[in-house]
């Protein structure tokens, strides 16, 4: 593995960093409010195992909603496509990621897709395991495999902070339990879910995961199949249609590649057959996406013709 600083990437970071002043860090999760607003970093992991970076690309951050894509890949392997999508839909939504309204108006009453909170909670509930500890171990082992980070862990402070303030997510769970979308103990599910959101890594490791998806589930270093090809394609499709919250349509037009963001400021992006991209910029726009990170991807897409469309 060759990893080197890239002047062109650094120039783009310098160009877009002033945008961080227009955003805000996610303070509804108290532990995330401690983020440094103007942090910005990017890593590009190429299919040939070269890596380019700019900024503090080795600084750890929690993945938050980015984990929704990875846990979906595991649930599809555990349960199969039919089982998962009997309980969670495939359609994008223009509502905020934590909305409960569509659960009340949809028939049957199931989440519209796995990338909103209700859908992600239902998907985490599907992970195989006799206990919440076994489910958690399977999730983190899978992410370790994708990132090739054997000492991967989670930020306990962030997980605890999320668990203590996750009243809306609990409401989503109880509503879905009433309608037989999920089963089991809600607090056990919340424990697993908040820990998975708090899994932390850096831009380089996130970009490596992107490279796995870019190669349709193959490990970029060993060629080993980590995700079945049809599941990798399903995940990338959801990243295009739902991955950037209710800004996914605009992002598809302006950037045009599969991507998933998280409220800690991370973005996982995929240029199929070429490379994965990991971005960290905790200053968020009004829809919960990294404000400078999105602009960085827009510039890259224009300069290097990334769009899949």
Image: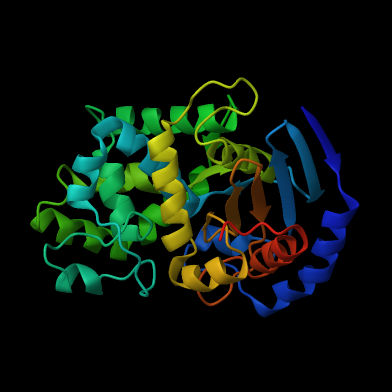
Q: How is the image coloured?
A: rainbow
Residue nearer the viewer, 289 or 258: 258
* x then y, percent, for residue 233: 43, 43
Q: Is residue 169 above or below residue 16?
A: above
Residue nearer the viewer, 304 or 54: 304
* x then y, percent, for residue 126: 25, 40
- Which quadrant of the view contains residue 200? top right
For the N terminus, give its image quadrant. top right
Residue nearer the viewer, 309 or 80: 309
Residue drawn where x is 58% and y is 42% of the image: 210
- Which quadrant of the view contains residue 176? bottom left
Specify the farthest residue to the right: 7
Taking 88 as reference, is 299 left or right? right
Asked if residue 61 can be seen in this view, the reply is: yes
Asked if residue 39 can be seen in this view, the reply is: no
Q: Is residue 26 above or below residue 45?
A: below
Residue drawn where x is 30% and y is 48% of the image: 190
* x then y, percent, for residue 68: 41, 49
For the C terminus, give its image quadrant. bottom right
* x then y, percent, for residue 169: 30, 60
Q: How many marks?
A: 0
Residue nearer the viewer, 209 or 199: 209
- Which quadrant of the view contains residue 32? bottom right
Residue drawn where x is 33% and y is 52% of the image: 120
């Amino acid at each position: 593995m060759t990893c080197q600083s890239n002047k062109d990437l650094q120039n783009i970071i310098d160009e877009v960093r002033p945008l961080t002043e227009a955003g805000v860090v996610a303070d509804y999760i108290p532990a995330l409010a401690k983020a440094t607003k103007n942090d910005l970093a990017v890593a590009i992991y190429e299919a040939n195992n070269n890596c380019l970076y700019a900024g503090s690309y080795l600084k750890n951050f929690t993945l938050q909603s980015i984990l929704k894509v990875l846990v979906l890949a595991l649930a599809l392997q555990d349960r199969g496509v039919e089982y998962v999508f009997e309980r969670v839909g495939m359609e994008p939504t223009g509502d905020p990621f934590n909305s409960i309204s569509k659960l009340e108006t949809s028939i049957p009453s199931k989440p519209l897709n796995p990338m909103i909170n209700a859908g992600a909670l239902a998907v985490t509930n599907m992970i195989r395991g006799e206990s919440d500890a076994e489910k958690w171990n399977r999730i983190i082992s899978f992410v370790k495999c994708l990132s090739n980070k054997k000492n991967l862990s989670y930020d306990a402070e962030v997980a605890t902070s999320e668990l203590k303030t996750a009243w809306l997510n609990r409401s989503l769970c109880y509503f879905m339990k009433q309608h037989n979308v999920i089963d089991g103990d809600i607090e056990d599910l919340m424990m697993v879910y908040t820990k998975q959101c708090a899994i932390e890594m850096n831009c380089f490791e996130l970009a490596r995961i992107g490279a796995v998806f870019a190669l349709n589930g193959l490990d970029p270093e060993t060629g080993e199949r980590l995700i079945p090809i049809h599941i990798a394609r399903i995940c990338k499709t959801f990243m295009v249609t739902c991955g950037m919250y209710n800004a996914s349509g605009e992002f598809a037009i302006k950037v045009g590649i599969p991507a998933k963001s998280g409220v800690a400021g991370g973005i996982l992006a995929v240029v199929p057959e070429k490379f994965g991209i990991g971005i960290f910029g905790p200053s968020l726009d009004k829809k919960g996406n990294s404000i400078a990170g999105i602009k960085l991807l827009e510039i890259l897409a224009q300069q290097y013709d990334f769009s899949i469309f």
